[in-house]
Amino acid sequence: EFLLLARPADEQPEAVDIAQILRECVDTLEPRSEQAGVAVALECHGLLPPVAAYPFALRRALLNVIMNAIQFAPRDSEVNIVIIGHDNQVVLDTLDRGPGIPPDKREAVFEMFTTARPEGTGLGLFLAKTAIRRCGGDIRALGREGGGADIRITLPAAKTATADNK
């Protein structure tokens, strides 16, 4: 996976429907979430403009972030994916009720080979960060009120969508 995402790709950025990609990711990970005893809920708020992204890279990034949340969420809990659209960007929060990420580790979780799980490779969030930044976005680890983690992704709206909406 690392070699696939690290190589220069012939994939071109395009306007993509972030809600559709997220639904596909949640469906793909449904067997894992069921096995872990974790529900995954997707909430969309506001008008969601298409985002400018490399579709394959964005899909892999979102799969890594959601899978990470499922792995850290306690059994019988819920991972919430909340998307809020704005005129020029989309903000996506992946929220879990796991142990959370200490403030002094929130940047380090995106470094290569950094993991809190014995069976982890430390590549998932690193690759997600690489893909999100390649799309012109940002990814940050935050705390969640009441405990848990919030992985916040901000992606720019596709320029054609922004021009059409004005």
Image (tube, rainbow, N blue to C red):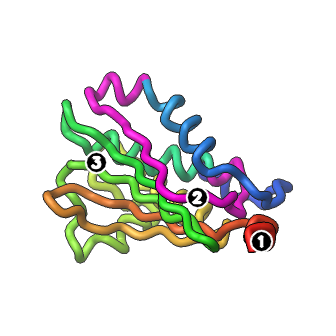
Residue of label 2: 47
Tell me where residue 10 appears, x and y as whole percent: 85, 55
Residue of label 3: 117
Q: Earlier in the sequence, mark 1 or mark 3?
A: 3
Q: Residue placed at 29% from the left, 28% from the top?
A: 36
The amino acid sitting under disc 1 is: Lys
Q: Is residue 68 left or right of residue 156?
A: left
- For the C terminus, the quadrant is bottom right
The amino acid sitting under disc 3 is: Arg
| Near-viewer residue (91 or 67) | 91
Q: Earlier in the sequence, mark 2 or mark 1?
A: 2
Say if residue 67 shows up in the picture: yes
- For the N terminus, the quadrant is top right
The kind of secondary structure element at disc 2 is loop
Tell me where residue 12 appears, x and y as whole percent: 83, 58
Does the stretch in magenta take in 147?
A: no
